[in-house]
Amino acid sequence: MGEAWPAPGSEAERARFLALQTRLEPMFRDTYANPLAERTVVVVPGLSLDQETLGHIPGAAHYEERQLSMLMLLRLPHTRLVFVTSTPIDPAIIDYYLSLLSGVPSSHARRRLVLLSAYDAAPRPLSSKILARPRLVQRIREAIPHRESAHLSCFNATAEEVTLAVRLGIPLYACDPALAWLGTKSGSRQAFREAGVDLPDGAESLRGADELAEALAALKARRPGLARAVVKLEEGFSGEGNAVFDYGDLEAGDVTPARLMDVLPTRLRPEADGMCPERFLAKFGEMGGIVEVWLEGREKRSPSVQMRITPTGVLEVISTHDQLLGGNSGQVFLGSTFPADERYRGSLQTAGQRVGEVLADHGALGRFSVDFVTVRETEGWAHYAIEVNLRKGGTTLPFQMLQFLTDGRYDAGRGEFHTPTGQRRVYFATDNLQREAYRQLTPEDLVDLIVEHRLHFDPTRQQGVVFNLIGALSEIGKLGLVSISDTPAHAETLYRRTVAVLDREVSSEATSMPE
């Protein structure tokens, strides 16, 4: 409690942080190669992102639950997990995840799990809440028996996660915030050029409505037939920081920066519900961003490649996905299917790897993904890189659950996931199953339905459904789930059967309520 910490953002803090980071390589090489080794993982699952944009995502306060997949690490008998959240997680949710640990008694896993909370539901980053409570920081420190074999895991790394790592005295297994620019929209475009992969025509490093208008005019001059363009906030995420600009009936000769300045408020449609064009333009002035052509195509997909750069400097391809998108113009992340379509999976993975190699050369670390727009053209499928997510994301929990529950492995050569017995596994996942009627259900009710209708993951067959975002169920009727099976068709069938059961139950409950 009485230790003097270096000032946040100071050279002294930076030096101490870099010294801690040197522990990662030997820890990863030696300790983490041994499943029986003692280790401690401190999980701080908050989203250190723009809170205003985050506020447009329904149930965002519960998104810390998306990292409950980390509880599956407790299948390793000498692993200790310290999980810190903004507000306490319902015990029924913790019990549900621990029940998925095949072969490990829940009591054994629970002894190695420390749950801590800031008891603070305010809309600000979790790391900020922790740092504002020195006694909570001390309790986290006391829950780490050996700092030499411990690390901090987070959704994304900012200066506050650096400060937290220094005060806990453990390294941060995430990309150094000094390289955060690589994960911005402008930095992504720079990385794509360095990697030699295709990207949409556009302009980056824009600031303010005047520069945006100039870029939109230049884009129309280069492409007179262009009907729409995408405007993206520099640090937007899940598509919520995007807007569509509609050129409409404006002729190329009439599209001047001055003319566009006049029509920006009426022709710009933000993707985030509740955000008006005026507020989006104000955010663009504060944060900056990019503009890109709206890619057209008779058949268009939105796949992504998930990768990891280990502390030993090795680039690993983790998976490929086809993203399920919705929202006003189809840019908001709703879920995913794994793996990506076999018709373009190989070339997609190759393009993603080339970007990953560039990030590795810059010194990036940890999990990240590269999003693409893939369009079917005469010669085949063309991939256009649109974004680097230098953090965990919506596809992290589904894949981790698949990996931990089956103890299988992704075969990068074939682009497929196989169990230890060689059986193929795929999944259909969503973060956005939402019905107003689901608000009738509590976490305990959902567990009852899982048992009654056998809506669970079967460890013997290594197939079934896994739920997440359970805490958002009663509050806003939102739920996430991962449907794991041997074929895409069966995975979707399991998903639809599960939804049908939930819908039927809430419907019958509503009709049977007493007057």
Image: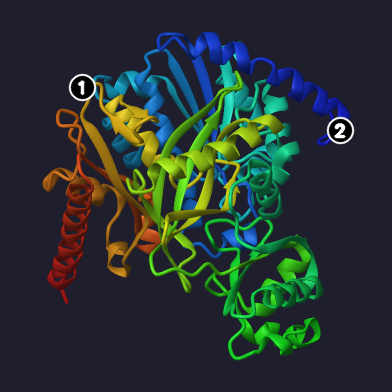
Q: Residue at x 39, y 51 (%)?
A: 322
Which x, y percent locates residue 308?
Answer: 53, 31
- Residue 227 visible within the image: yes
State the quadrant of the C terminus: bottom left
Which x, y percent locates residue 433?
Answer: 33, 59
Find the distance from the CA under tag 2 to the CA under tag 1. 52 Å
State the quadrant of the N terminus: top right
Viewer-nearest of discs 2 and 1: 1
Element assignment for label 1: loop
Quadrant of residue 76 in the image?
top left
Amino acid marked by disc 1: Thr
Colour treatment of the image: rainbow
In this rendering, position of residue 262 left or right of residue 342: right
Q: Residue at x 12, y 48 (%)?
A: 453
In this rendering, position of residue 390 left or right of residue 158: left
Give the mark count: 2
Q: Identify residue for label 1.
A: 421
Q: Identify residue for label 2.
A: 10
Q: Earlier in the sequence, mark 2 or mark 1?
A: 2
Quadrant of residue 65 in the image?
top left
Q: Using the image, determine if residue 415 lies above or below residue 377.
A: above
Residue neighbourhood size for the residue with mark 2, other residues' Cα within 10 Å, grouped as few (<14), some (14–19), many (≥20)? few
Q: Using the image, determine if residue 470 lies above or below residue 501.
A: above
